[in-house]
Structure formats: C-alpha cells, structure tokens
C-alpha cells in the first residue's frame, strides 16, 4: 500500500469512528450539552473536524473549492445528529477524493496551505498533523458523549 493510501485509510477509518460517536448520542440535544469548564460540545467538535478536513484536505490538497466557515463551526448550536452526520459524510467524501488521487511524491512536496506547521513542512507532515487532530477531538467527543446528563 502506498503512503498516500495509508493516510487515506486512516482518515476514513477515523471519520467513521467520529460518525459512530455522533450516532451513539441518545438524542439530538445531547451533542450540544457542555459541563463545567468544558466549553466545546461534541457537536461543536464534530463541526470543527468536518470543516477543518474539508478545508485542509479537500480544498488545499484536493482542490475541491470548499470555502471554510470556521466561525460557524464554533457558533452553530442545535443541529440534529443527522445534520452533523451529513457534515462528517461531506468531510469523508472530500478526504476520499483528495487522497485517492494523491501520489507518494506529492506527500513530500512543501506544504503551502497555511495552518500550524513550521516553514519547510511537507504535505505529508500536515496530513500527519491533521490525523492527530482528528483522533484527539474524536476522543473528546467520546468523553463528552459519556458525560452524565446533569453535568
């Protein structure tokens, strides 16, 4: 399996895990619950991950034309689980499309799409960063989902 195919497989697996977490909430209000010092709900994290991947992988790597609305990712509230799953599915399609055609040589190209990496980083480095970001926040969604309803 090529390196690009390995990245694709990991992203698709972890987006499926995120979707499973959203499906596991007991109702449409639960993804939006917060507790104590926890500021970002599971719904917010799901929207953030979907927008982040559609932007950096879909648009920057794959040229999809997606225009990110990061403010919406953190401001939206009350969307149904189905709407969240639609956003995750859109991110999954964007990642699949972008990484299906990516060559291993493209992974070594300089990353020029902005974001948190130091100058001189490669596309592969950014994909590694994004994969970790996806896994980190999916774990947070899992934790949020299991919080008691009374906080």
Image (spheres, rainbow, N blue to C red):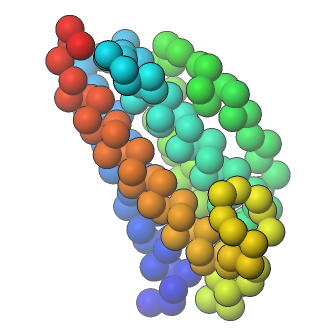
Question: Residue at horizontal 53%, vertical 44%?
Answer: 49
Question: Which residue occupies the foreground of this view, 101 or 46?
Answer: 46
Residue 70, x across and y down, in percent? 69, 34
Rendered view: 105 above or below 141 = below
Q: Residue at x 49, y 74 (%)?
A: 7
Q: Is residue 111 visible in this depiction of the protein? A: no
Above/below status of 34 relative to 87:
above
150 over 89 or under it: above or below = above
Residue 132 rendering spot, x and y as whole percentages = 45, 60
* Quadrant hosting residue 99: bottom right
Report the side of 96 relative to 136 (left or right): right
In the image: residue 144, left or right of residue 137 = left
Quarter placement of the C terminus: top left
Is 82 left, or right, of 57 in this rendering? left
Left/right placement of residue 144 relative to residue 106 reads left
When the figure is inspected, residue 29 is found, relative to residue 139, above or below; the finding is: above
Q: Residue at position x 75%, y 72% from top?
A: 119
Q: For residue 45, say whether it is visible.
A: yes
Quarter assignment of residue 47:
top right
Q: Give whichever of 36, 20 is nearer the camera.
A: 36
Q: Quadrant of residue 143?
A: top left
Q: Residue furthest top?
A: 150
Q: Count the marks: how many?
A: 0
Q: Which of the two residues, 86 or 25, is positioned nearer the viewer here?
A: 25
Instruction: Name the residue at 45% across, 26% down.
Output: 40
Q: Quadrant of the N terminus?
A: bottom left
* Residue 114 coordinates in the image, percent (x, y): 76, 59
Residue closest to the eye, 86 or 136: 136
Q: Position of residue 66 (x, y in %)?
A: 77, 47
């Amino acid at each position: 399996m090529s390196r690009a195919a390995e990245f694709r497989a990991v992203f698709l697996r972890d987006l499926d895990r995120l979707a499973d977490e959203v499906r596991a909430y007991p109702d449409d209000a639960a993804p939006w619950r917060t507790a104590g010092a926890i500021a970002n709900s599971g719904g917010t994290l799901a929207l953030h991950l979907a927008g982040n991947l559609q932007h950096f992988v879909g648009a920057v790597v794959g040229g999809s034309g997606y225009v990110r609305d990061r403010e919406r990712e953190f401001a939206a509230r009350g969307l149904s689980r189905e709407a969240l799953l639609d956003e995750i599915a859109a991110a999954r399609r964007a990642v699949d499309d972008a990484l299906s055609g990516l060559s291993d040589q493209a992974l070594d190209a300089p990353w020029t799409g902005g974001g948190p990496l130091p100058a001189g980083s490669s596309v592969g480095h950014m994909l590694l960063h994004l994969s970790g970001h996806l896994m980190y926040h999916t774990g947070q969604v899992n934790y949020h989902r299991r919080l008691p309803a009374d906080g």
